[in-house]
Amino acid sequence: MKMLNPRARLFYLCFFAVLFALAPIVRARAADEMFDFETLRYRAKLLAAKPYAVPKPRVPEWLLKLSYDQHRFINFEDARAVWRGEKRNFQLEFFHPGFLFNRTVQLSELVEKRVEPIAFDPHLFRYDQKLKVGELPATMGYAGFKLMYPLNQPNDELGAFLGASYFRLLCQKAVYGLSARGLALNTAEPGGEEFPVFTDFWIERPAVGARTIVIYALLDSPSVAGAYRFTITPGADTVAQVRAAVYGRQGVKTFGIAPLTSMFWHGENSNAPTDDFRPEVHDSDGLMMFTGAGEWLWRPLTNPRAMRVTAFGDENPRAFGLVQRDRKFDSYQDLEAAYHQRPSAWVEPIGQWGRGSVRLVELPTPDETNDNIVVFWAPEKLPPPGEPVEFEYRLHWFLDQIQPPAGRAIATRLGRSKTHEPDLERFVIDFDGNYLSKQSADPAIEPVVTVGEGAKLTYAAVQKNPFNGTWRVAFSIRPDGTGRPIELRCFLRKPPHVLTETWSYLWQP
């Protein structure tokens, strides 16, 4: 063997000395490359700095051609859920692409902050013999995923992330109803709404016995890219704490934070014929708000003849949400849909959100198959270009846990008299509450009714209902004939005390 000359020997000695010296630094740097929210935020910032790229299709054509019934021939094998048999409270199941689910997401498991990608595996699914199965690429991905948790009994479904930035969660004793979204862009604006999409998810492997699970998501759209973290704690009040940092690519007209989407077909305040045997059909019956000024406000939902948008201006809102307040089975008479068990969703901002408005969008719907209600927070100002929109909030999913401390409106009815002053529009609002139900008839309790432009108040009265202990306000208005929408407000007081939340209604002649 040829011996190295002294100069070459010195070079290699120096080279390996430097290499060994750098080895701990390289290992430390690799250890630093662990996934967390800051890692995701940086990725979203880099993504927003690039032009939007339309995702390449990854779902085979034969899956996209499946009908609704054919797609139901594909079912996840529950026994193969992620973490099944590991004595963890949470489990993961996946949705198969196909039918309307033409986009897939990249899923990864986080194990001690290290990323372990979850590849598509056809063996996790059961394909019915009626279905002619074609190509199933390993790179296809999943349409979404669902969370399993012992809410009421083992292996109950807790929630699902499926489609665009939509997700739904359940609390104890509830069935699926309204949905939430990561972000709403240009909702109800001319030119159409933009629907951002969660493209990637990272799910932390929960510890044995853990009652909280953490999920990260990357959001992308032509206008924005964003980083999200969901910390979900199930229970009678299931709470998802949401943290987000959203970077803009281009300006948007409406930036909707903490959007909720629901369905309202008909209820007590609906007079239009539906040819439906059920008295009421809705996932939510009202928008409830707790304003920055401390006012509790209730706006019953409607199924309008045309789209309408209402903005409730506020500063640093304390909370808002879509509520299913009526919990009586007799109000719905639906053994299958169980509308009386649909959860409410309540947004509780963390920190100061500044000035803006809670936006309520109501769309007409001919039946119960369409989500026609949207609610979100629209900030008055957004940060300068290049700076992220950052926000955090707790999203509660519950049945009856959150109510205003004073009395509340429990029913809204309206109509006209066929015989006595048929030109008047009459409203009947029932109020209930711990204090009110205990009070006997009291002339000092009075209704405060406010009528906006377009009509005049002609009569207002309140009386104790001796049959159920509630208090009923009845008032009538005379429209001026212009046909403009009329804002109405009503609450009860016993001077100097306010006894109820403020009932708010937009009536269209």
Image (cartoon, grey):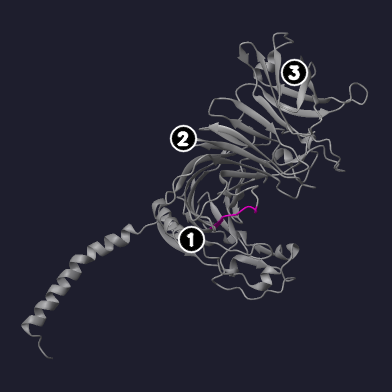
Q: Residues within 10 Å of mark 1 (few under 14, many from 20)?
A: some
Left or right of 363? Residue 29 is left
- Quadrant occupied by the N terminus: bottom left
Q: Main secondary structure of the magenta part?
A: loop
Q: Is residue 129 magenta?
A: no
Q: Earlier in the sequence, mark 2 or mark 3?
A: 2
200 on left or right of 133: left
Separation of marks 3 and 1 at Cα, in angstroms: 55 Å
Numbered badge on residue 108:
1
Instruction: Name the one closer to the observer, 255 or 297.
Output: 255
Q: Earlier in the sequence, mark 1 or mark 2?
A: 1
Q: Nearer the viewer, residue 353 or 320?
A: 353
Which residue is at 21% across, 66% downward? 22
Q: Which residues are magenta?
A: 191-198
SS for tag 3? loop
Of the image marks 3 and 1, the number of the one nearer the N terminus: 1
User: How many other residues sit within 10 Å of disc 3, few (<14), some (14-19) or many (≥20)?
Assistant: some
Residue 401 shows up from this direction? no
